Image: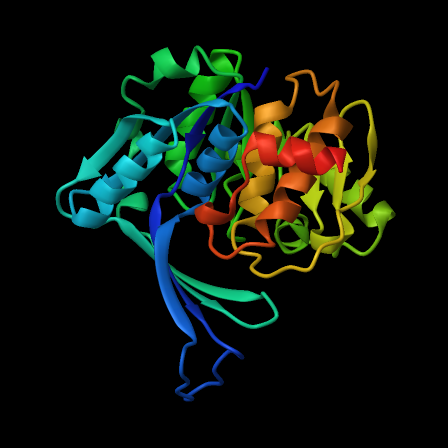
Amino acid sequence: MANKIAVLGSINIDTTYRVNEFPKPGQTIQALSKSSTGGGKGNNQAVAAARSEAQTYFIGMVGTDDEGKFMLENLAEEGINTDLISQNKEIGTGTALVTLNSAGQNDIMVYGGANQAMTTEVLTGSEVVLAQVDFLLAQNETPQEVTLAAFKLAKSLGVTTIFNPAPAGKIMLTLLEYTDIIIPNETECQALTGSEITDEASMQAAANAFKEMGVGTLLITLGSKGVYYSTPSSQGLVPAFKVQALDTTAAGDTFIGALASQLNKDLSNIVPALTYAQKASSLAVQKMGAASSIPSAEEIRAALTR
C-alpha cells in the first residue's frame, strides 16, 4: 500500500522549445517544436507520488490568472488534494522556459512568480493534513523560511521530512536540522558540503558531513550511475537502468515522488524503494515533457517484471 504524502513546493507552467543544439551567446536559432505543460519541482514530485498511488496533498501558491486556474484543475485531475494551494491576486503563476537539445539535455530558466511570494500563511490549516501523512516533501524553488516552518510543524506531528535542495543554492543550516532525508544530485551535494563527488568514499564523506548538520539519511542521485544511499544503519549504491534518454526534464522529480510513495518510514525497504524509483525515472526520460512523462504505478511495476 502506497504512502500518504504532502508536498510543499513550486507550481509552474513549463514551455519547452526543442532544438538541435543550444544557441551560442548572441545567436538566433529556429526551434523544432514548442509545447506547454504543467511543471515546477513541487508539481512534478506530487504528480509522481500520485501516479504511484500515494494519497497526495499539495501546499503551494498560484496566481489568479488562467495559468493558475489551469494548474489547479490539472492537479485535481491527478487526484491531488489542492485545498492548501493559495491564490495570489497580484503575482502571477510561476513559469519555466525549457530548451531541449537533440541529445536529451536541457537548459531551464525559471520565473518564480507566486511560488516565491509564499509566506508562512500558506501553512494555515495544514496541521490537519500533516497529522495524516507519512512524508512531507519540499524543494528549493520556494522560500526556505516557509519550508523551515513546515518542517518544524511536520516534525512535531511525527512526519518524516524529505528535502530536495534543487536548484543548488545556499541553504539555511537550521532547515537541515529539521530534515530527515536529503536528496541532492552530485552538483547540489558539492555545493552544500564543499566536497566533489568522485567515488563511494567521497559520497560517504558527504553523508558524514550531512550527519554533522543534522540530516540522518542522504540519497545522492547520480544520473546514469544510479543512486547512493546512506542511512543510520546501511549504505550502498543502487545502479540505474540503462536506457536511451530522450528528455531528462523531471527525471529527478519523478524519482523523488515515486520513492516517497513506496518508502517505509523506518527505511526497512530502502533498496526495493530505490529500485522502484529508479525504474520510474528511467521510464520518464524516454518520453518528452515534464509531468506528462511521469509513469503510473502500473507501468512501473510492469517494467520491473520485464
The residue depicted at 36 percent of the width and 52 percent of the height is: 37
Please give left or right for residue 40 compared with residue 169 in the image: left
Residue 194, percent from left and from top: 68, 53
The image quadrant where one finds the N terminus is top right
The residue depicted at 68 percent of the width and 40 percent of the height is: 279
The mark total stands at 0
Residue 211, visible in the rendered structure: no
Is 192 in front, or is 26? 26
Q: Is residue 198 above or below residue 87?
A: below
Q: Residue 183 sits in which quadrant?
A: top right
Q: Is residue 94 above or below residue 64?
A: below
Q: Residue furthest bottom?
A: 27
Q: Is residue 78 above or below residue 250?
A: above
The residue depicted at 53 percent of the width and 65 percent of the height is: 106
The residue depicted at 51 percent of the width and 36 percent of the height is: 48
Residue 104, percent from left and from top: 58, 65
Is 98 in front, or is 130? 98
Please give left or right for residue 70 compared with residue 154 in the image: left
Residue 26, percent from left and from top: 41, 88
Residue 133, percent from left and from top: 48, 16
